[in-house]
Structures are given as structure tokens and as C-alpha cells.
Amino acid sequence: MSSIDERAWFKSSYSGSDGDDCVEVAKGTRAVHVRDSKDRRSPELAFSPAAWNAFITHTAQG
């Protein structure tokens, strides 16, 4: 498992550049990791790729 510092984290293109509240996401081989962009040392969430895909599909439907 890769360490937090080795993951390629990214924010949504909808995030503002003013330091707005947002989450960051990093795709791993076994999980999709999510963390608070304001506090990168806080605990992160990890979802299976199937669960993440279901979440994205549901939110895209509005």
C-alpha cells in the first residue's frame, strides 16, 4: 500500500482557487481515497472502486 505522501491527490475542477472547502481524491489500486483539503493530515476515507463508481453515478444523476 502506498503512503499518503505518494498518492496523486486531486480536487474537483469545480473547486475555487480561494481555498474553498473541498475534498481531494486519490485513486489507488484497491481503493479510492478521500480527504479534507483543508486538513490533509486528518483521517481519510477509503472506498472500493465499485462503491466509488456507484457514488459518482448517483451524484451525476442529480
Image (tube, rainbow, N blue to C red):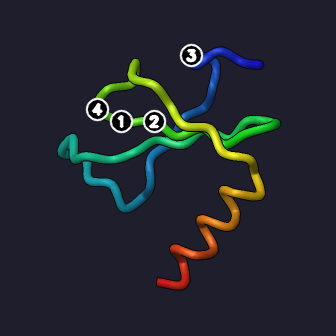
Q: Position of residue 19 (x, y in %)?
A: 21, 41
Camera-side residue of 56 and 17? 56
Name the residue beneath numbered marker 2: 35
| Kind of element beneath mark 2 | strand
Q: Secondary structure at mark 3?
A: helix
Describe residue 62's horizontal placement relative to residue 30 as left or right.
Answer: left
**Mark with earlier residue (3, 4):** 3
Where disc 1 sits, the SS reads loop
- Characterize the local packing of mark 2: few (<14), some (14-19) or many (20 or more) Cα atoms within 10 angstroms: some
Q: At x 60% / y 65%, what residue is drawn?
A: 55
> 24 and 45: which one is in front?
45
The disc labelled 2 sits on which kind of residue? Arg
Give the numbered dot on residue 38. Answer: 4
Q: Residue furthest left?
A: 18
Q: Earlier in the sequence, mark 3 or mark 2?
A: 3
Residue neighbourhood size for the residue with mark 4, other residues' Cα within 10 Å, grouped as few (<14), some (14–19), many (≥20): few
Give amino acid for label 3.
Answer: Asp
Cα distance between the residues tagged 2 and 4: 9 Å
Are the residues flagged by discs 2 and 1 in contact, CB closer than 8 Å?
A: yes
* Mark sitting on residue 37: 1
Q: Is residue 1 above or below residue 27?
A: above
Verify CB contact (< 8 Å) between mark 1 and mark 4: yes
Where residue 23 sits in the image (x, y, percent)? 40, 45
Q: Residue at x 75, y 51 (%)?
A: 49
Residue 42 place in picture, x, y as percent? 39, 23
Indicate which disc residue 5 carries. 3
* Place of residue 22 in the rendered image (x, y in percent of width and height, measured from the top left): 33, 47
Residue drawn at (45%, 36%) of the image = 35
* Residue type, mark 4 in image: Lys
Q: Amino acid at mark 1?
A: Ser
As measured in the structure, the alpha-carbon distance from the residue carrying label 2 to the one carrying label 1 is 6 Å
